[in-house]
C-alpha cells in the first residue's frame, strides 16, 4: 500500500496546478505497479527531451503542448506546461542533433528548428539546456545517498557506482514526471539493501586503458546473469573516470545493470565484504582474454578497408581527451572525402576553444560537435557513409542496427589514423 505525505497528497489533488497533478498521477500509478510503499525526494535529474525521434508518431506540425501532455505525462487531457520542482536540479540529456551544426551532420534545418523550439519550452519550465550524456563533467554530480533520475543508462551506472547516489533506469516518462513533482517511487537502487553485490567478477584479461574497460564493460554485461549486482575484483590498474565512463556505457548495452562495484575503487566497495553486505555471492564469472577478444569481434568488423565516416565520443568526451586528440593529430590532415566527428558538451567545447584544441581539430579537417552522436541522430545523419570507424563500443555495436555498411571498432588513436589515411588498418 503506497503511503503519501501530506505534500504529495496535495500535489495529487491539484494544489500546484493541473500539470503537476497529472505528473503526480503518473508517479502514483508507476509506484503501485512496482509495489513501492513510499516515494522518495528527487533532487537531481537529466531528461532526454525535445524533438526526439521517438516522437515521429506525431505529425510534424503537432501542438507541443498536446505532445507533452500525452507522451510525457501520459494524459489524454491537454494541460499547461508545469514547472520543474524547485527542489530538483534538472538538465537536458543528449540531444537528437547538434543545434549549431545541422549542415555538418546532415540533419535538416527544419528538424533543428523544431528541436530548438521544443527545448526552449522545456527551458521555460526550469530545465537547463546542457545536452550531455556525461553530465558529471559539467557539474551534475550527485552526492552519496542523493536520489536522482536520469535517462542516460551510463550515467545511471556512474552515479550509482562512482558517486554512491541512488537511482534507477526508469525511462523517459518517469524521469520527466519525477523532475516535475520532485518525487519518484522508492524501489530498486533507491533502497540500500538492493545495492549489495551477489555476482563476483574476476578480471583476468588486460585492463590497462580506456579501450580495455570499454571492452570489459561489454563482456561483463553479456556474461553475467540477469538481475544481479556485480562486484569486480582482480589485479589491474585502477580505472580513471574516463575509463569507467566507457565501462558504464557498454555494460548498459549488454545488460540491465544499474550499479557495479569495484573493490577498493567505488565508495560502497572499500572491501568485498562491504560490497556484499547482507547478501551472499551466488554467481561468479571470469573475464578472460578469450572472452575479451570475443567481445571485440562482436562489436565491430574484423576486416580492413576504406572508411569515410569516423565518430569519436560515445559517451561525450572530457577536456583532457580533447587535448590528447589535438596533440595526436599534430598538424596532419583528414583525408579528402572523409568525415571526422568528435563529440562533447557545450561547456567542454568552450574550454576546448580557449585552449586551442578545437582549432587544431578543425584545422585538420575534423569537426568538434556538441550534444549528440550518430547513434542518437540515427540514419539521416550517416546514411551516406560507405564505411564507418568508431570509438566506443556502445556506438559501434548499436549503429550496426541502423546501417548495412561495415562498422569498424578501435581506440581513439586508430580512429584518428583512419580519418587521416582513409583506411582502417585493423588492430
Image: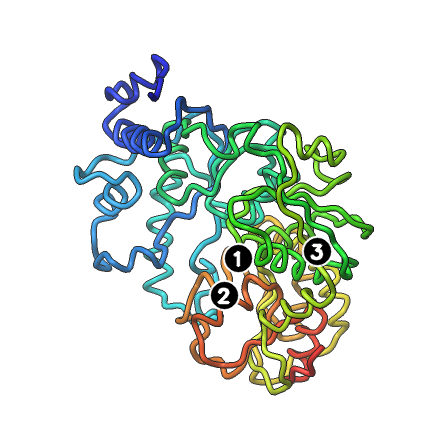
Q: Please determine whether, in this image, residue 254 is positioned above or below residue 74.
A: below
Return the x and y of residue 263 as percentages of the image width and height: 74, 40
Q: Find numbered disc 2 in the image and state the secondary structure of the residue it sits on.
A: helix
Q: Nearer the viewer, residue 89 or 397?
A: 397
Mark 3 highlights which residue?
286
Q: CA–CA distance between discs 3 and 1?
A: 19 Å
* Category of crowding for the residue at label 1, using alpha-carbon neighbours closer than 10 angstroms: few (below 14), some (14–19), many (at least 20): many
Q: Please determine whether, in this image, residue 426 is positioned above or below residue 92.
A: below
Q: Find numbered disc 3 in the image and state the secondary structure of the residue it sits on.
A: strand
* Category of crowding for the residue at label 3, using alpha-carbon neighbours closer than 10 angstroms: few (below 14), some (14–19), many (at least 20): some
Return the x and y of residue 139 as percentages of the image width and height: 61, 38
Q: CA–CA distance between discs 1 and 2?
A: 8 Å
* Category of crowding for the residue at label 2, using alpha-carbon neighbours closer than 10 angstroms: few (below 14), some (14–19), many (at least 20): some
Mark 1 highlights which residue?
253
Tell us which disc is closer to us: 2 or 3.
3
User: Disc 1 vs disc 2: Cβ atoms closer than 8 Å?
Assistant: yes
- Quadrant for residue 377, please give it: bottom left
Residue at 32% x, 34% y is 33
Return the x and y of residue 322 as percentages of the image width and height: 69, 59
Sequence-wise, which precedes: disc 1 or disc 2? 1
Tell us which disc is closer to us: 3 or 1.
3
Total labels: the figure holds 3
Mark 2 highlights which residue?
398
Amino acid at each position: 500500500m503506497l503511503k503519501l505525505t501530506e505534500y504529495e497528497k496535495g500535489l495529487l489533488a491539484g494544489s500546484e496546478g493541473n500539470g503537476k497533478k497529472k505528473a503526480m498521477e503518473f508517479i502514483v500509478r508507476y509506484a503501485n505497479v512496482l509495489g513501492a510503499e513510499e516515494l522518495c525526494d528527487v533532487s537531481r535529474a537529466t531528461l532526454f527531451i525535445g524533438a526526439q525521434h521517438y516522437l515521429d508518431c506525431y505529425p510534424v506540425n503537432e501542438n507541443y503542448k498536446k505532445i507533452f501532455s500525452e507522451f510525457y505525462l501520459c494524459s489524454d487531457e491537454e494541460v499547461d506546461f508545469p514547472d520543474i520542482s524547485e527542489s530538483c536540479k534538472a538538465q537536458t540529456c543528449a540531444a537528437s542533433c547538434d543545434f549549431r551544426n545541422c549542415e555538418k551532420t546532415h540533419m535538416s534545418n527544419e528538424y533543428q528548428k523544431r528541436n530548438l523550439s521544443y527545448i526552449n519550452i522545456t527551458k521555460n519550465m526550469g530545465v537547463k539546456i546542457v545536452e550531455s550524456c556525461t553530465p558529471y563533467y559539467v557539474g551534475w554530480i550527485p552526492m552519496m545517498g542523493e536520489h536522482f533520475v536520469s535517462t542516460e543508462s551510463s550515467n545511471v551506472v556512474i552515479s550509482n557506482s562512482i558517486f554512491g547516489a541512488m537511482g534507477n533506469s526508469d525511462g523517459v516518462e518517469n524521469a520527466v514526471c519525477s523532475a516535475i513533482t520532485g518525487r519518484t517511487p522508492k524501489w530498486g537502487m533507491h533502497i540500500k539493501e538492493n545495492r549489495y553485490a551477489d555476482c563476483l567478477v574476476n578480471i583476468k584479461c588486460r585492463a590497462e586503458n580506456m579501450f580495455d574497460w570499454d571492452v570489459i564493460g561489454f563482456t561483463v554485461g553479456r556474461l553475467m546473469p540477469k538481475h544481479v549486482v556485480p562486484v569486480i575484483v582482480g589485479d589491474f590498474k585502477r580505472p580513471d573516470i574516463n575509463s569507467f565512463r566507457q565501462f558504464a556505457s557498454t555494460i548498459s548495452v549488454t545488460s540491465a545493470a544499474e550499479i557495479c562495484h569495484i573493490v577498493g575503487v567505488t565508495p560502497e566497495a572499500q572491501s568485498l565484504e562491504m560490497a556484499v553486505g547482507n547478501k551472499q555471492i551466488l554467481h561468479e564469472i571470469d573475464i578472460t582474454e578469450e572472452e575479451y577478444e570475443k567481445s571485440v569481434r562482436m562489436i565491430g568488423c574484423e576486416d580492413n578497408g576504406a572508411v569515410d565516416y569516423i565518430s569519436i565520443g560515445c559517451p561525450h568526451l572530457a577536456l583532457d581527451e580533447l587535448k590528447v586528440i589535438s596533440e595526436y593529430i599534430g598538424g596532419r590532415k583528414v583525408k579528402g572525402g572523409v568525415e571526422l566527428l568528435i563529440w562533447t558538451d557545450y561547456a567542454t567545447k568552450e574550454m576546448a576553444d580557449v585552449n586551442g584544441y578545437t582549432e587544431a581539430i578543425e584545422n585538420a579537417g575534423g569537426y568538434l560537435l556538441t550534444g549528440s552522436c550518430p547513434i542518437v541522430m540515427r540514419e539521416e545523419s550517416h546514411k551516406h557513409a560507405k564505411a564507418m570507424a568508431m570509438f566506443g563500443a556502445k556506438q559501434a555495436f548499436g549503429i550496426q542496427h541502423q546501417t548495412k555498411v561495415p562498422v569498424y571498432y578501435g581506440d581513439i588513436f586508430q580512429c584518428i589514423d583512419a580519418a587521416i589515411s582513409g583506411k582502417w588498418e585493423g588492430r
